[in-house]
Image (cartoon, rainbow, N blue to C red):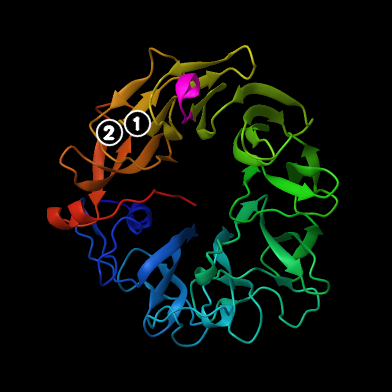
Protein backbone atom coordinates (compact mmCIF):
# COMPACT_ATOMS: atom_id res chain seq x y z
CA UNK A 1 0.00 0.00 0.00
CA UNK A 2 1.28 3.48 -0.83
CA UNK A 3 2.01 5.95 1.95
CA UNK A 4 -0.08 9.09 2.42
CA UNK A 5 2.72 11.21 0.95
CA UNK A 6 3.00 8.90 -2.08
CA UNK A 7 -0.74 9.24 -2.61
CA UNK A 8 -0.42 13.03 -2.53
CA UNK A 9 2.52 12.97 -4.90
CA UNK A 10 0.66 10.74 -7.34
CA UNK A 11 -2.26 13.15 -7.21
CA UNK A 12 0.21 15.91 -8.09
CA UNK A 13 1.59 13.86 -10.98
CA UNK A 14 -1.71 12.73 -12.39
CA UNK A 15 -3.67 15.97 -12.08
CA UNK A 16 -2.28 17.50 -15.30
CA UNK A 17 -2.49 14.20 -17.20
CA UNK A 18 -6.19 13.42 -17.29
CA UNK A 19 -8.95 15.95 -17.85
CA UNK A 20 -12.34 14.31 -18.55
CA UNK A 21 -15.31 16.55 -19.24
CA UNK A 22 -16.57 16.45 -15.64
CA UNK A 23 -13.17 17.09 -14.06
CA UNK A 24 -10.21 14.83 -13.32
CA UNK A 25 -10.54 11.64 -11.27
CA UNK A 26 -7.47 9.96 -9.85
CA UNK A 27 -7.11 6.23 -9.19
CA UNK A 28 -3.90 4.48 -8.21
CA UNK A 29 -2.85 1.07 -9.50
CA UNK A 30 -1.42 0.09 -6.11
CA UNK A 31 -4.05 -0.18 -3.37
CA UNK A 32 -7.68 0.84 -3.34
CA UNK A 33 -7.67 4.65 -3.35
CA UNK A 34 -11.07 6.23 -4.14
CA UNK A 35 -11.53 8.71 -6.97
CA UNK A 36 -11.06 12.37 -5.95
CA UNK A 37 -13.55 14.98 -7.06
CA UNK A 38 -12.00 18.27 -8.11
CA UNK A 39 -12.87 21.35 -10.15
CA UNK A 40 -12.14 21.45 -13.85
CA UNK A 41 -9.07 23.00 -15.45
CA UNK A 42 -6.72 22.35 -12.52
CA UNK A 43 -3.31 24.00 -12.79
CA UNK A 44 -0.45 25.63 -10.82
CA UNK A 45 -0.05 22.63 -8.51
CA UNK A 46 2.10 23.13 -5.41
CA UNK A 47 2.75 21.15 -2.23
CA UNK A 48 2.90 22.89 1.16
CA UNK A 49 3.35 20.80 4.28
CA UNK A 50 1.52 17.53 3.66
CA UNK A 51 -1.14 19.03 1.40
CA UNK A 52 -1.51 19.70 -2.31
CA UNK A 53 -2.70 23.17 -3.41
CA UNK A 54 -3.89 24.05 -6.89
CA UNK A 55 -5.99 26.51 -8.88
CA UNK A 56 -9.25 25.21 -10.30
CA UNK A 57 -12.51 26.47 -11.79
CA UNK A 58 -16.03 25.52 -10.69
CA UNK A 59 -19.41 26.94 -11.86
CA UNK A 60 -20.39 28.27 -8.42
CA UNK A 61 -17.14 29.85 -7.20
CA UNK A 62 -15.25 30.59 -10.40
CA UNK A 63 -11.45 30.28 -10.45
CA UNK A 64 -10.00 29.90 -6.96
CA UNK A 65 -7.35 28.07 -4.90
CA UNK A 66 -8.18 24.51 -3.76
CA UNK A 67 -6.39 22.03 -1.50
CA UNK A 68 -6.31 18.24 -1.10
CA UNK A 69 -4.83 15.67 1.27
CA UNK A 70 -5.35 12.94 -1.34
CA UNK A 71 -8.86 11.94 -0.22
CA UNK A 72 -12.33 13.02 -1.50
CA UNK A 73 -13.32 14.46 1.88
CA UNK A 74 -10.00 16.27 2.17
CA UNK A 75 -10.34 18.07 -1.19
CA UNK A 76 -12.00 21.48 -0.92
CA UNK A 77 -11.90 25.17 -1.78
CA UNK A 78 -9.70 27.13 0.62
CA UNK A 79 -11.82 30.28 0.31
CA UNK A 80 -14.03 31.99 -2.28
CA UNK A 81 -11.83 35.10 -2.39
CA UNK A 82 -13.54 36.72 -5.37
CA UNK A 83 -17.16 35.92 -4.42
CA UNK A 84 -19.28 33.97 -6.86
CA UNK A 85 -18.56 32.78 -10.40
CA UNK A 86 -16.31 34.62 -12.82
CA UNK A 87 -16.71 35.21 -16.54
CA UNK A 88 -14.64 32.16 -17.51
CA UNK A 89 -16.60 29.72 -15.32
CA UNK A 90 -19.85 30.95 -16.90
CA UNK A 91 -18.58 30.22 -20.39
CA UNK A 92 -18.36 33.89 -21.36
CA UNK A 93 -15.64 35.84 -23.12
CA UNK A 94 -13.36 37.61 -20.64
CA UNK A 95 -13.44 41.39 -20.78
CA UNK A 96 -10.29 43.48 -20.73
CA UNK A 97 -10.64 43.94 -16.99
CA UNK A 98 -8.91 41.63 -14.49
CA UNK A 99 -11.76 42.13 -12.01
CA UNK A 100 -14.01 40.18 -14.37
CA UNK A 101 -11.42 37.43 -14.73
CA UNK A 102 -9.51 37.17 -11.43
CA UNK A 103 -7.27 34.13 -11.73
CA UNK A 104 -5.23 33.37 -8.58
CA UNK A 105 -1.59 32.59 -9.03
CA UNK A 106 1.16 31.78 -8.87
CA UNK A 107 1.49 29.39 -5.93
CA UNK A 108 4.58 29.37 -3.70
CA UNK A 109 5.13 27.46 -0.46
CA UNK A 110 6.93 28.40 2.74
CA UNK A 111 6.71 26.94 6.24
CA UNK A 112 3.76 24.65 5.51
CA UNK A 113 1.64 27.46 3.99
CA UNK A 114 0.91 28.39 0.40
CA UNK A 115 1.24 31.93 -0.97
CA UNK A 116 -0.41 33.37 -4.06
CA UNK A 117 -1.61 36.53 -5.74
CA UNK A 118 -5.35 37.21 -5.66
CA UNK A 119 -7.96 39.94 -5.52
CA UNK A 120 -11.31 40.05 -3.73
CA UNK A 121 -12.61 42.56 -6.25
CA UNK A 122 -12.25 45.54 -3.91
CA UNK A 123 -8.49 45.99 -4.23
CA UNK A 124 -5.60 45.21 -6.52
CA UNK A 125 -3.94 41.78 -6.70
CA UNK A 126 -2.10 41.31 -3.41
CA UNK A 127 -0.06 38.59 -1.72
CA UNK A 128 -2.26 36.08 0.14
CA UNK A 129 -1.34 33.25 2.53
CA UNK A 130 -3.31 30.04 3.25
CA UNK A 131 -2.88 27.10 5.60
CA UNK A 132 -5.65 25.22 3.75
CA UNK A 133 -8.54 26.54 5.85
CA UNK A 134 -10.89 29.43 5.15
CA UNK A 135 -10.02 31.10 8.47
CA UNK A 136 -6.32 30.75 7.70
CA UNK A 137 -6.56 32.37 4.26
CA UNK A 138 -5.91 36.12 4.23
CA UNK A 139 -3.72 38.86 2.72
CA UNK A 140 -0.18 38.90 4.13
CA UNK A 141 0.00 42.71 4.12
CA UNK A 142 -2.81 45.08 5.09
CA UNK A 143 -4.30 46.39 1.79
CA UNK A 144 -4.33 49.86 3.35
CA UNK A 145 -0.58 49.94 3.91
CA UNK A 146 0.87 52.68 1.67
CA UNK A 147 3.77 50.59 0.33
CA UNK A 148 1.71 47.38 -0.07
CA UNK A 149 3.26 45.06 -2.70
CA UNK A 150 0.98 44.79 -5.75
CA UNK A 151 1.48 41.66 -7.83
CA UNK A 152 0.42 41.60 -11.50
CA UNK A 153 -2.81 39.63 -11.85
CA UNK A 154 -3.01 36.77 -14.31
CA UNK A 155 -5.25 37.82 -17.19
CA UNK A 156 -6.14 34.76 -19.23
CA UNK A 157 -7.59 36.80 -22.07
CA UNK A 158 -4.32 38.74 -22.44
CA UNK A 159 -2.19 35.60 -22.20
CA UNK A 160 -0.24 36.86 -19.17
CA UNK A 161 1.86 34.26 -17.35
CA UNK A 162 1.95 33.93 -13.55
CA UNK A 163 4.82 35.69 -11.79
CA UNK A 164 7.13 33.16 -10.16
CA UNK A 165 7.43 32.80 -6.38
CA UNK A 166 10.64 31.15 -5.18
CA UNK A 167 11.50 30.06 -1.60
CA UNK A 168 15.10 30.28 -0.40
CA UNK A 169 16.74 30.59 2.99
CA UNK A 170 13.44 30.56 4.89
CA UNK A 171 11.96 33.39 2.83
CA UNK A 172 9.70 33.64 -0.22
CA UNK A 173 10.79 35.89 -3.10
CA UNK A 174 8.45 37.46 -5.64
CA UNK A 175 8.17 40.38 -8.04
CA UNK A 176 5.73 43.21 -7.29
CA UNK A 177 5.25 46.95 -7.61
CA UNK A 178 5.47 49.21 -4.55
CA UNK A 179 2.20 50.90 -3.67
CA UNK A 180 3.77 54.26 -2.86
CA UNK A 181 5.46 54.93 -6.19
CA UNK A 182 4.72 51.98 -8.48
CA UNK A 183 8.39 50.92 -8.53
CA UNK A 184 8.73 47.36 -9.85
CA UNK A 185 11.25 45.18 -8.08
CA UNK A 186 12.17 42.17 -5.99
CA UNK A 187 10.43 41.52 -2.66
CA UNK A 188 10.81 38.89 0.04
CA UNK A 189 8.61 37.74 2.92
CA UNK A 190 8.83 35.41 5.90
CA UNK A 191 5.03 35.04 5.83
CA UNK A 192 4.30 38.00 8.12
CA UNK A 193 3.45 41.63 7.37
CA UNK A 194 6.43 42.90 9.36
CA UNK A 195 8.72 40.51 7.50
CA UNK A 196 7.60 41.53 4.00
CA UNK A 197 10.11 43.93 2.45
CA UNK A 198 11.11 45.59 -0.80
CA UNK A 199 14.67 44.60 -1.79
CA UNK A 200 15.78 46.26 -5.00
CA UNK A 201 14.39 47.82 -8.21
CA UNK A 202 15.13 44.79 -10.37
CA UNK A 203 13.02 43.51 -13.27
CA UNK A 204 12.98 39.83 -12.40
CA UNK A 205 11.08 36.63 -11.55
CA UNK A 206 8.36 36.78 -14.18
CA UNK A 207 7.33 33.77 -16.21
CA UNK A 208 10.35 34.13 -18.50
CA UNK A 209 13.10 34.72 -15.94
CA UNK A 210 15.00 32.05 -14.05
CA UNK A 211 15.76 31.72 -10.33
CA UNK A 212 16.79 28.93 -7.98
CA UNK A 213 17.78 28.30 -4.39
CA UNK A 214 21.53 27.78 -3.97
CA UNK A 215 22.30 26.63 -0.41
CA UNK A 216 19.92 29.16 1.16
CA UNK A 217 20.74 32.02 -1.21
CA UNK A 218 18.52 33.03 -4.13
CA UNK A 219 20.35 33.14 -7.47
CA UNK A 220 18.35 34.81 -10.22
CA UNK A 221 18.44 36.73 -13.44
CA UNK A 222 18.20 40.42 -12.72
CA UNK A 223 18.15 43.52 -14.85
CA UNK A 224 18.92 47.16 -14.21
CA UNK A 225 19.57 50.04 -16.62
CA UNK A 226 23.26 50.29 -15.68
CA UNK A 227 24.37 46.65 -16.03
CA UNK A 228 21.66 45.16 -18.19
CA UNK A 229 20.96 41.45 -17.67
CA UNK A 230 23.08 39.58 -15.15
CA UNK A 231 23.23 36.90 -12.48
CA UNK A 232 22.20 38.32 -9.10
CA UNK A 233 22.01 36.92 -5.57
CA UNK A 234 19.93 37.75 -2.50
CA UNK A 235 19.72 36.61 1.13
CA UNK A 236 16.37 38.36 1.56
CA UNK A 237 17.76 41.70 2.75
CA UNK A 238 18.31 44.90 0.71
CA UNK A 239 22.01 44.97 1.60
CA UNK A 240 22.39 41.30 0.67
CA UNK A 241 20.89 41.71 -2.80
CA UNK A 242 23.56 42.40 -5.43
CA UNK A 243 24.90 41.67 -8.90
CA UNK A 244 27.26 38.68 -9.15
CA UNK A 245 28.34 38.76 -12.82
CA UNK A 246 27.14 39.84 -16.26
CA UNK A 247 27.26 37.22 -19.02
CA UNK A 248 26.61 39.24 -22.16
CA UNK A 249 22.88 38.65 -22.41
CA UNK A 250 19.75 37.27 -20.75
CA UNK A 251 19.93 34.06 -18.72
CA UNK A 252 17.95 31.20 -20.24
CA UNK A 253 18.74 28.16 -18.06
CA UNK A 254 20.40 27.50 -14.68
CA UNK A 255 21.36 24.43 -12.66
CA UNK A 256 23.32 24.39 -9.38
CA UNK A 257 25.49 22.00 -7.38
CA UNK A 258 26.73 23.53 -4.13
CA UNK A 259 27.75 27.13 -4.90
CA UNK A 260 28.59 26.30 -8.54
CA UNK A 261 25.98 27.22 -11.13
CA UNK A 262 25.81 26.19 -14.77
CA UNK A 263 24.28 29.13 -16.63
CA UNK A 264 23.14 29.32 -20.24
CA UNK A 265 23.10 32.87 -21.56
CA UNK A 266 21.90 34.15 -24.93
CA UNK A 267 22.94 37.01 -27.11
CA UNK A 268 20.74 40.09 -27.03
CA UNK A 269 18.77 38.78 -30.02
CA UNK A 270 18.96 35.11 -28.85
CA UNK A 271 20.79 34.07 -32.03
CA UNK A 272 23.77 32.55 -30.21
CA UNK A 273 24.23 30.82 -26.86
CA UNK A 274 26.98 30.31 -24.28
CA UNK A 275 27.26 27.88 -21.40
CA UNK A 276 29.12 29.06 -18.28
CA UNK A 277 30.21 27.67 -14.92
CA UNK A 278 29.81 30.42 -12.30
CA UNK A 279 31.00 30.49 -8.69
CA UNK A 280 28.27 32.29 -6.73
CA UNK A 281 30.69 33.47 -4.02
CA UNK A 282 33.58 34.87 -6.08
CA UNK A 283 31.62 35.77 -9.22
CA UNK A 284 34.17 34.00 -11.44
CA UNK A 285 32.73 32.66 -14.72
CA UNK A 286 34.32 29.89 -16.83
CA UNK A 287 33.11 29.54 -20.42
CA UNK A 288 32.25 25.90 -21.15
CA UNK A 289 30.97 26.12 -24.71
CA UNK A 290 29.78 28.46 -27.44
CA UNK A 291 26.58 26.98 -28.87
CA UNK A 292 24.63 27.44 -32.05
CA UNK A 293 21.51 25.92 -30.51
CA UNK A 294 19.89 26.32 -27.12
CA UNK A 295 20.27 23.97 -24.14
CA UNK A 296 17.23 21.77 -23.41
CA UNK A 297 18.38 20.21 -20.14
CA UNK A 298 21.16 20.27 -17.53
CA UNK A 299 21.95 17.73 -14.79
CA UNK A 300 24.88 16.80 -12.55
CA UNK A 301 26.41 13.40 -11.85
CA UNK A 302 29.00 14.00 -9.15
CA UNK A 303 31.33 16.65 -10.59
CA UNK A 304 30.33 15.83 -14.17
CA UNK A 305 27.93 18.23 -15.89
CA UNK A 306 25.66 16.71 -18.54
CA UNK A 307 23.59 18.92 -20.84
CA UNK A 308 21.46 18.37 -23.92
CA UNK A 309 21.23 20.51 -27.05
CA UNK A 310 18.40 20.28 -29.56
CA UNK A 311 19.23 21.61 -33.00
CA UNK A 312 20.70 20.62 -36.35
CA UNK A 313 24.18 19.32 -37.16
CA UNK A 314 27.16 18.70 -34.91
CA UNK A 315 25.72 20.54 -31.90
CA UNK A 316 22.63 18.35 -31.52
CA UNK A 317 22.70 15.66 -28.82
CA UNK A 318 24.08 14.98 -25.37
CA UNK A 319 27.17 16.72 -23.98
CA UNK A 320 29.40 16.22 -20.94
CA UNK A 321 31.76 18.62 -19.14
CA UNK A 322 34.27 18.49 -16.30
CA UNK A 323 33.86 22.23 -15.73
CA UNK A 324 36.43 23.40 -18.27
CA UNK A 325 36.30 24.43 -21.92
CA UNK A 326 38.78 21.72 -22.91
CA UNK A 327 36.83 19.07 -20.99
CA UNK A 328 33.48 19.79 -22.67
CA UNK A 329 32.52 17.45 -25.53
CA UNK A 330 29.55 15.72 -27.16
CA UNK A 331 29.09 12.13 -25.95
CA UNK A 332 25.98 11.05 -27.88
CA UNK A 333 23.84 12.08 -30.83
CA UNK A 334 20.57 11.30 -28.99
CA UNK A 335 17.97 13.17 -31.05
CA UNK A 336 15.73 15.65 -29.23
CA UNK A 337 17.27 14.98 -25.81
CA UNK A 338 15.79 17.09 -23.01
CA UNK A 339 14.42 16.99 -19.49
CA UNK A 340 17.51 15.60 -17.72
CA UNK A 341 17.21 14.46 -14.10
CA UNK A 342 19.52 12.66 -11.67
CA UNK A 343 18.76 9.10 -10.54
CA UNK A 344 21.43 8.16 -8.02
CA UNK A 345 24.78 8.11 -9.83
CA UNK A 346 23.34 8.33 -13.36
CA UNK A 347 21.22 10.76 -15.35
CA UNK A 348 17.91 9.93 -17.02
CA UNK A 349 16.38 11.99 -19.82
CA UNK A 350 13.67 12.01 -22.44
CA UNK A 351 14.20 12.21 -26.19
CA UNK A 352 12.42 11.80 -29.50
CA UNK A 353 13.18 8.07 -29.29
CA UNK A 354 11.93 7.65 -25.71
CA UNK A 355 13.76 7.35 -22.39
CA UNK A 356 17.54 7.08 -21.98
CA UNK A 357 20.18 6.98 -19.23
CA UNK A 358 23.77 8.21 -19.20
CA UNK A 359 26.79 8.36 -16.90
CA UNK A 360 28.29 11.16 -18.99
CA UNK A 361 30.23 8.90 -21.34
CA UNK A 362 29.53 7.57 -24.83
CA UNK A 363 29.59 3.91 -23.77
CA UNK A 364 27.46 4.67 -20.74
CA UNK A 365 24.55 6.21 -22.69
CA UNK A 366 21.75 3.71 -23.35
CA UNK A 367 18.03 3.56 -24.15
CA UNK A 368 15.65 2.58 -21.33
CA UNK A 369 12.46 0.65 -22.14
CA UNK A 370 10.03 1.21 -25.01
CA UNK A 371 8.21 4.46 -24.34
CA UNK A 372 6.51 7.10 -26.45
CA UNK A 373 5.99 10.78 -25.68
CA UNK A 374 8.02 10.80 -22.45
CA UNK A 375 7.62 13.86 -20.22
CA UNK A 376 10.59 15.49 -18.50
CA UNK A 377 11.65 13.19 -15.61
CA UNK A 378 11.57 14.51 -12.03
CA UNK A 379 14.09 13.43 -9.38
CA UNK A 380 12.54 11.83 -6.28
CA UNK A 381 15.18 10.50 -3.89
CA UNK A 382 17.53 8.30 -5.95
CA UNK A 383 14.92 7.68 -8.66
CA UNK A 384 13.18 9.65 -11.37
CA UNK A 385 9.43 9.78 -12.01
CA UNK A 386 7.93 10.56 -15.39
CA UNK A 387 4.78 10.29 -17.48
CA UNK A 388 4.84 8.31 -20.73
CA UNK A 389 2.89 6.09 -23.07
CA UNK A 390 4.06 2.48 -23.19
CA UNK A 391 4.44 0.26 -26.28
CA UNK A 392 0.64 -0.08 -26.39
CA UNK A 393 0.24 3.74 -26.28
CA UNK A 394 -1.39 3.62 -22.83
CA UNK A 395 -0.54 6.58 -20.62
CA UNK A 396 0.92 6.10 -17.15
CA UNK A 397 3.20 7.45 -14.44
CA UNK A 398 6.47 5.52 -14.15
CA UNK A 399 9.53 5.46 -11.89
CA UNK A 400 13.11 4.44 -12.65
CA UNK A 401 16.48 4.07 -10.92
CA UNK A 402 18.24 4.30 -14.29
CA UNK A 403 18.18 0.56 -15.03
CA UNK A 404 15.86 -1.61 -17.13
CA UNK A 405 14.94 -3.75 -14.13
CA UNK A 406 14.32 -0.70 -11.97
CA UNK A 407 11.93 1.00 -14.43
CA UNK A 408 8.33 0.20 -13.50
CA UNK A 409 4.74 1.44 -13.72
CA UNK A 410 3.32 3.31 -10.72
CA UNK A 411 -0.17 4.45 -11.81
CA UNK A 412 -2.49 5.38 -14.64
CA UNK A 413 -5.01 8.27 -14.77
CA UNK A 414 -7.76 5.64 -15.03
CA UNK A 415 -8.05 1.86 -14.69
CA UNK A 416 -10.07 1.91 -17.93
CA UNK A 417 -7.52 1.39 -20.75
CA UNK A 418 -9.70 3.30 -23.22
CA UNK A 419 -9.87 6.35 -20.97
CA UNK A 420 -6.14 6.18 -20.24
CA UNK A 421 -5.27 5.85 -23.92
CA UNK A 422 -7.30 8.99 -24.74
CA UNK A 423 -5.81 11.13 -21.95
CA UNK A 424 -3.67 14.07 -22.94
CA UNK A 425 -0.04 14.10 -21.88
CA UNK A 426 1.61 17.12 -20.30
CA UNK A 427 4.87 17.55 -18.43
CA UNK A 428 5.16 16.17 -14.92
CA UNK A 429 6.22 18.90 -12.52
CA UNK A 430 7.29 19.06 -8.89
CA UNK A 431 7.39 22.13 -6.64
**Quarter occupied by residue 415:** bottom left
Q: Which image quadrant for residue 424?
A: bottom left
What is the number of the mark on residue 429?
A: none
Q: Which residue is mark 2?
A: 407
Picture layout, residue 95 above or below residue 178: below
Asked whether residue 131 is in view, the answer is: no
Q: Residue at x 36, y 41 (%)?
A: 385
**Secondary structure of residue under mark 1:** loop
Q: Where does the image place residue 209, in percent across and percent down from the top left?
A: 63, 49
Where residue 318 appears, x then y in whole percent? 46, 23
Q: Is residue 402 left or right of residue 314?
A: left
Of the residues under marks 2 and 1, which one precedes in the sequence? 1
Of residues 25 and 111, the one nearer the viewer is 25
Q: Residue at x 67, y 59 (%)?
A: 174
Q: Is residue 306 visible?
A: yes
The numbered mark at residue 401 is 1
Question: Is 121 one of the magenta-colored residues?
Answer: no
Specify the segment rendered in magenta.
309-318
Amino acid sequence: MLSRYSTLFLSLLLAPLAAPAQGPAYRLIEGEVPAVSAPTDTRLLTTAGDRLFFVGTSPSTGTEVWTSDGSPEGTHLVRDIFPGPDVVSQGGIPEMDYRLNPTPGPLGSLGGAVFFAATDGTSRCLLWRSDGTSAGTAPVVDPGRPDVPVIPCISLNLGNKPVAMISSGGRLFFRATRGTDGALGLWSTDGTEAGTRYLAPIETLDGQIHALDVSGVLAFQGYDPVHGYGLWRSDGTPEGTRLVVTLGGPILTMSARGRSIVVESGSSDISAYRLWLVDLESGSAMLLRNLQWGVTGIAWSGRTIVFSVHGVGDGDGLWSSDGTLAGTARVSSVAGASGLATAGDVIVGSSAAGLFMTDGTTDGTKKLGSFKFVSAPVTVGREVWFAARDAQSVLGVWRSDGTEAGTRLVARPSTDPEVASRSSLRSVTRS
